[in-house]
Amino acid sequence: MTDKIKEAARCRAEEVRRRMKRFKLVFVQCGAVFDVIREPLLEELGGMRMKADEFAAGDCEVDENTTTVILDDVEAFAPTGISRGTTLGALRQKVNELCDKDVTVCLVSRRPRNAFAPVTGSHLLEDASPYYLPLLEEHECLDGKHNVGGPTLPAAGLNESLDLDELIRSAVGELGVNVLTELDFALFEARQEQNFATEIDPSVRDALRSAGLLHLVGEEPRFALTQLWRLKKAVADAMAEIVTPQSDLAAVSGDLWQIERTIRRFLRDAAIADSPTKWRKGLLNESLAAEVLKRARGDVNVTAASVADLRDPIEWLSLGEMLDIVQSKKYGGLFWDEVTWRRFRNDVLPIRNRLSHMRLLKRGDRATVRMWALHAARIKA
């Protein structure tokens, strides 16, 4: 370990201790960007150091004379709020007990606060005062490793050799799905490249700053790298690697199922009321009927000769196609007016499309779909 690493860790530990003295409960993200100083930093903090889940489970006790506790590996609770059979709620209770005894606590995580699942106890992280580990100034870097465009990432300034793209991939991978989906929108859909640091959502900005990928110049956020394409590539790679279902997936899928089945039911009832014996043929125009028949025959109804042979041709319509029929002059929107249907299309169709293509859900999707599911549940026959 070089003297440069030790000194950088010592200076930052002093600031963390100062914040702990002021606020009692502090949150520090120390992930890939800061990994080079992680161990000496935690050693410099002093106090009693424990793994957060072991402490929450009661596997280790705090000595009665201890005044400072460092809880490491808090990120173990991030995916589900549970680690090794204990919950984030249990951790919060035990941390509160320490604070009530005037013990100062530092929560150390490799992941930002908004990467944690919103479960009972997650507001422990919101209650904690965040400390953003600063990047390196020129005098803190190894010779020739300083970023001339501004502060230097510790992993770059204190390593003799570094794969910068691998570092950014690791740092982005720690941000969590919520931040990744917001970055995906900002960089690839909205293309907010020109003023990227100022235009992204404040919670995303906070996560990037916590990870060391953003820093402040005065009050203005600046990206820590001059090449934004490196971040774009890292985000694309991180998104592709996510194969675990998001925690909201089941709830969103269930509500979308209820909404779509409700619309189908009322459209079917209206079509039968209009033409009791020939409603299947009367529902679709010629080109759409041919397409629906093709889909049905390719699925299960191999012998069907026309849509009249299908039990329910509505089941082979996309949501967009079904909405076009519902909003047609013939059916007049059924149970909602034009304004409501327009809002529904704007809110729900993008989420439905994301789900059907196995793309990641975005923050707010669950609340949006839940709202429309409640509206659909209130529709009266």
Image (cartoon, grey):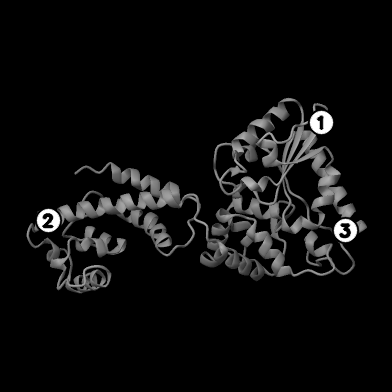
Task: Specify the quadrant of the image occupied by residue 87.
Answer: top right
Q: Residue at x 22, y 42 (%)?
A: 380
**Kind of residue indicated by mark 2:** Ile
Residue 3 image point, x, y percent: 92, 57
Q: Is residue 244 left or right of residue 320?
A: right
Q: Residue at x 22, y 61 (%)?
A: 314
Q: Earlier in the sequence, mark 1 or mark 3?
A: 1
Q: Nearer the viewer, mark 1 or mark 3?
A: 1
The residue beneath circle 2 is 272
Q: Earlier in the sequence, mark 2 or mark 1?
A: 1
Front residue (pair 327, 354): 354
Task: Specify the quadrant of the image occupied by residue 275.
Answer: bottom left
Label 3 – label 2 distance at C-alpha:
77 Å
Residue 299 image point, x, y percent: 27, 69
Q: Residue at x 81, y 46 (%)?
A: 42
- The disc at residue 66 is 1
Q: Earlier in the sequence, mark 3 or mark 2?
A: 3
The residue beneath circle 3 is 140
